[in-house]
Image (cartoon, rainbow, N blue to C red):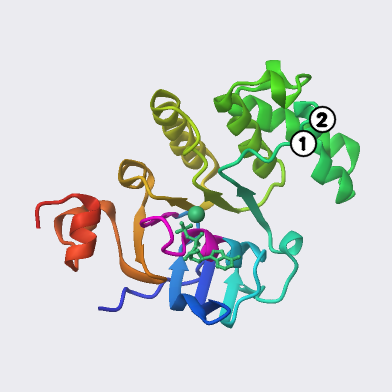
Amino acid sequence: MMAAAIANPSVSIQDLSLNFGVMSVLKTLNLDVAEGEFIVLLGPSGCGKSTLLNCIAGLLDISEGRIFIKGKNVTWEEPKDRGIGMVFQSYALYPQMTVEKNLSFGLRVAGVPKEEIAKRIARAAEILQIEPLLQRKPSALSGGQRQRVAIGRALVRDVDVFLFDEPLSNLDAKLRSELRVEIKLLHRRLQNTMIYVTHDQIEAMTLADRIAVMKGGVIQQLDAPQTIYNRPVNRFVAGFLGSPA
Ligand code: ADP
Ligand code: MG
């Protein structure tokens, strides 16, 4: 079944294949993400979710295919020129820098004027409620606070497309559900395009506009959460979502 084409997709992945040596990890994959859409890539460990995200980010060279972001072919663009912000599972904050420096570092490197940097940091700190933490070092933050700062680093880049790779999987259950709500609110407020990787079904069901269920480097089904839950296309999808089919 072909999904209806999306006019002017924010991110368009066309016939993307990626091999590590002789191992085929992504197999002629196609995915169009609408402007402002929250897409979750859901699947078991090793199915290729992070690899796909890293291809979109430009951190891996693809074997075949093309990637468009906002209509522009970015297949061979540097990561920094793709107009994306990325948040990883490990917090990847600079331990020797304060939160404020962590937020400003990339912008200073990119030559963004000082006043503009200050403005963007103030806005991100307000949205993520990390104003009181700006002068602390990462070692003085809780796991949840660190992950807020990591999201802040994507936020200050002022891009329309965010890529999140299991941002909550190192957190305990309570924090995970709190931050899940925050990410949902953040998306409502910013209306940005979000591609969010997880192996957590609840995260996928609560966050996604559409879920792409992956297995073995192939998207098995791409649909709204309720459709995936009520009408899984195969046993794998049914089993993975825990629905009765
Ligand atoms: P996921 O994020 O869904 O858990 P990954 O995208 O990390 O899965 O990995 C997909 C497959 O590619 C796995 O079989 C993994 O072992 C393999 N893989 C990932 N990165 C590399 C690499 N740099 N070199 C070789 N194989 C890799
Ligand atoms: Mg992964």
Q: Is residue 175 above or below residue 191?
A: above
Q: Which mark is residue 97?
A: 2
Label 2: element kind: loop
- Pick out the residue farthest to the top: 132
Q: Which mark is residue 57?
A: none
Q: Please tell me whether residue 46 belongs to the stretch shown in magenta.
A: yes
Q: On the image, numbered disc 1 is attached to which residue?
A: 94
Position of the N terminus by quadrant: bottom left
- Pick out the residue farthest to the front: 22
Q: Is residue 214 above or below residue 20?
A: above
The front one of 194 and 172 is: 172
Respond yes or no on whether mark 1 lies under 8 Å from ligand 2: no
Res 227 seen here: no
Span colored in magenta: 38-53
Q: Is residue 200 above or below residue 24?
A: above
Q: Is residue 244 above or below residue 14?
A: above
Q: Please tell me whether residue 175 belongs to the stretch shown in magenta.
A: no
The front one of 218 and 69 is: 218
CA separation in Å, label 2 and label 1: 6 Å
**Toward which corner of the image does residue 154 lie, by quadrant?**
top right
What residue type is disc 2 on? Met
- x and y percentages locating residue 20 in the rendered image: 57, 75
Tally the numbered discs: 2
* Disc 2 + disc 1, Cβ < 8 Å: yes
Label 1: element kind: loop
What residue type is disc 1 on? Tyr
